[in-house]
Image (spheres, rainbow, N blue to C red):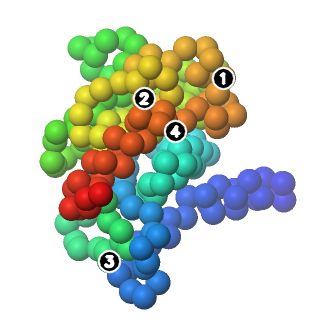
Amino acid sequence: MFNAIPRILLAALLMVPPLCAVDPKCNAGTLPVVTIYINEKINLALYERARAIFVATRAFREIGVQLTWREGSVSQEPESPACNPAGVIELQVDQAADASEPPDVLAYATPASNSGARIHVFHDRVAGFSAQVPNLLGYVLAHEIAHVLQGIARHSDDGILKARWIGRDYNRMGTFSLSFSREDAEIIGFHLGRRHGVTE
């Protein structure tokens, strides 16, 4: 019985509500929706996957962006439009990094790419740190998704988009308190608005 409860909770976390169709329920206050397709080259543990999705979604919701998650490669079939669609990103979880990647690189993004996997996460490297750093995978996902949404390769002095996290940052991950800097949130908001012709 005790094992069934965590499984039910994890299944609930993984449930992804369908994107809402454009209908009277959609209003001006709806958050911009970014759809993330996860293409796993390995089988992530249910708990690991659910926790990572929760952490990344929470981080973006704090800055006014809603992440919606799908499985597999970007669908060729048209989907019901979101209330406020803001983009589609394909994310691939690889078993291991290529030997050419520097040893401290956990993932990378290609913001300028318009097709294919735009984010690659190296599971072997993330898993090597995860035992000591709760929620690490979720923050790695948030970091790389932010690169794509900003549309440029840049890092910040503090927060989720910091180039190199240190002990204090890892501690904040454990309490879900690592967040985007104000500047990063503004850049993401600006680029999402510009893509959809929103002007001040």
The residue under the point 24% across, 40% down is 151
**Disc 1 to disc 4, C-alpha distance:** 14 Å
Q: Secondary structure at mark 4?
A: helix
Q: Secondary structure at mark 3?
A: loop
**Disc 2 to disc 1, C-alpha distance:** 16 Å
Task: Name which residue type carries label 2.
Answer: Leu
In this orientation, which residue lies closer to the viewer: 72 or 27?
27
In the picture, the disc for residue 78 is none
Q: Is residue 151 above or below residue 164?
A: below
Q: Earlier in the sequence, mark 3 or mark 1?
A: 3
In the picture, the disc for residue 171 is 1
Q: Nearer the viewer, mark 2 or mark 3?
A: 2
Q: Residues within 10 Å of mark 3 (few under 14, many from 20)?
A: few
Q: Earlier in the sequence, mark 1 or mark 4?
A: 4
Whether label 2 touches label 1, CB < 8 Å: no
Residue 38 shown left or right of residue 166 in the figure: left
**Disc 2 to disc 3, C-alpha distance:** 32 Å
Question: Badge 3 is on which residue?
Answer: 80
Task: Name which residue type carries label 4.
Answer: Gly
Q: Earlier in the sequence, mark 2 or mark 4?
A: 4
Whether label 3 touches label 4, CB < 8 Å: no
Whether label 3 touches label 1, CB < 8 Å: no
Q: Nearer the viewer, mark 2 or mark 1?
A: 2
**Splitting the image into 4 quarters, where does residue 120 fall?**
top left
Whether label 2 touches label 3, CB < 8 Å: no
Residue 36 in percent (x, y) is at 36, 53
Question: Badge 4 is on which residue?
Answer: 138
Residue 71 in percent (x, y) is at 38, 57
